[in-house]
Amino acid sequence: MEASPHTSPGLSPAKLVIEGVSKWFTPKRNIVQALDDISLTVAEGEFVCLLGPSGCGKSTLLNIVAGLTRPDRGRVLADGKPVAGPGQERLVMFQESALFPWLDAFGNVMFGLKLKPDLTKAERRRIADEYLDLVGLAKFKHAQIHELSGGMKQRVALARALAPDPQVLLMDEPFAALDAMTRDQLYDDIQRIWMESRKTIIFVTHNVREAVCLGDRIVLMSPSPGRIQQIFDIPLPRPRDINSPELAAYTSKIAAALKGVTNGAVFE
Ligand SMILES: Nc1ncnc2c1ncn2[C@@H]1O[C@H](COP(=O)(O)OP(=O)(O)O)[C@@H](O)[C@H]1O
Ligand SMILES: [Mg+2]
């Protein structure tokens, strides 16, 4: 088979195949083309970052992969089957964690496990404990959500998303609202968790440094309409040190490319 330019070499099999996806919105009778002919293959266990300025269609593409939004053209295949709606094998984590404030940390993770009705309550409790421990919150199991910092809330959201053991994790700027120090810690954690669990991850960001720290590949998108501009392989060993010179070199190269697609506007 001929190798596609949108396929990561050496990795297989394909977990997600996005084929010729286009999407239009019609707010106030205007027509906005959010996505134009997006094709991308994501290998099983791969960590792909979608990078681009606001409005380039990152969230729309992620929601289409999640099955929350229907494409107007093209399709998405997960394990070779067309995605027709949301499924527990593909979970989404958003910037605002949407935790239930009336449940404690443990209760929120247990809620995620409702997707697994075949498990006994004891098994669900054990799994919830395991994932709270994995994200470093074992001691805060019974904390109320309002008692937690922004970073801790996102850790609970991450535990809640991971606990049902989805094969694909779709993350939409999950750390964008956090301060830089908290984000740096979360980069270490998400890498460690990904190396242990080998989920397939699509991670949306407008932050180049974040994309370089996390991604096996970075898909640079451009706006109006949303298109794939360029794909970068990041072959740096893991876990990656956010302050390493190698990472800084990739960051400046990709920041320059991003600047190109935003007509010179500077993004973080
Ligand atoms: N539900 C919607 N209704 C109307 N327009 C939308 C809707 N969702 C997204 N758009 C438009 O589609 C384009 C891409 O948006 P989005 O996917 O949110 O971009 P990003 O996540 O990269 O910021 C933007 O022009 C946005 O205004
Ligand atoms: Mg978005």
Image (tube, rainbow, N blue to C red):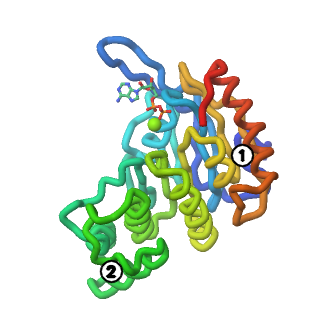
User: Disc 2 versus disc 1: distance between alpha carbons?
Assistant: 37 Å
Tell me: 157 left or right of 34: left
Residue carrying label 2: 124
**Percent x, y for residue 88?**
39, 60
Q: Residue at x 33, y 18 (%)?
A: 27
Residue under the image location 35 percent in, 76 percent down:
140
Q: Is residue 47 above or below residue 6?
A: below
Q: Is residue 115 visible?
A: no
Q: Of all residues shown, which one is farthest toward the top? A: 30
Residue drawn 43% across and 18% down? Answer: 32
Secondary element at image label 1: loop
Residue 134: give x, y in percent of width and height.
49, 76
- Taking the image as shown, residue 241 lies to the left or right of residue 210, namely right
- Mark 2: which secondary structure? helix
Find residue 66 and name its label.
none
Residue 108 sits in which quadrant?
bottom left
Closest to the observer: 156 or 220? 156
Q: Quadrant of residue 157?
A: bottom left
Badge nearest the viewer, 2 or 1: 2
Q: Residue at x 78, y 57 (%)?
A: 236
Q: Is residue 62 left or right of residue 124?
A: right
For residue 7, the mark is 1
Q: Is residue 238 above or below residue 253?
A: below
Residue 261 seen from this side: yes
User: Measured from the top left, where is residue 105 in percent x and y?
Assistant: 31, 70
Which is more N-terminal, label 1 or label 2?
1
Q: Amino acid at mark 2?
A: Arg
Q: x, y percentage for residue 99?
A: 29, 58
Crowding at dot 1, Cα within 10 Å, few <14 / some 14-19 / many 20+, comes out as some
